[in-house]
Image: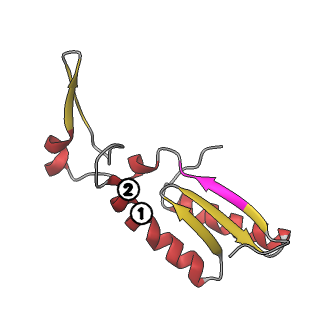
Amino acid sequence: LVQEGDWLFTIDLKSGYHHVDIHPAFWQFLRFSLQGQDYQFHSLPFGLATAPFVFTQLIKQLTKRWRSRGIRLIQYVDDILFISATRMKALHNRSIIIANLAARALFLYS
């Protein structure tokens, strides 16, 4: 997948799971208490057994789109490595990817 001379860049989605809203009917299943105070998640919590699968399935919609445009990538949950043959192609791909993420209100660590 990676060849000599390739240019690489990565993205790391900020609080990746928290981009996934949970339907209000299911909030009751995402409650916990800490020091006498009750808390309830309204987004996909880190630590939920199915969270990596759910999140990966949602991100897969974007990665399929990028791959169909010829963008090479390797994804691991909310971290994605992008591979381009040239520096110019890497910069071009990066602008496309950032625009796609921003359009879906997905934020990156800076």
Q: Secondary structure at mark 2?
A: helix
Query: What residue did someone put label 2 on?
Result: 52
Q: CA distance from mark 1 to mark 2?
A: 6 Å
Residue 54 image offset from top left, x and y in percent: 33, 60
Residue 79 image offset from top left, x and y in percent: 56, 55
Relative to 58, 105 lies left or right: right
Q: Is residue 25 above or below residue 67?
A: above
Q: Residues within 10 Å of mark 1 (few under 14, many from 20)?
A: some
Q: Are marks 1 and 2 in contact (CB under 8 Å)?
A: yes
Query: What residue did someone put label 1 on?
Result: 56
Q: Secondary structure at mark 1?
A: helix
Question: Label 2 amino acid?
Answer: Pro
Residue lying furthest top? 35
Please report the bounds of the magenta region as a residue range.
9-13
Q: Is residue 59 above or below residue 49?
A: below
Residue 36 image offset from top left, x and y in percent: 18, 16
Question: Label 1 amino acid?
Answer: Thr
Residue beneath the point at 57% across and 84% down: 68
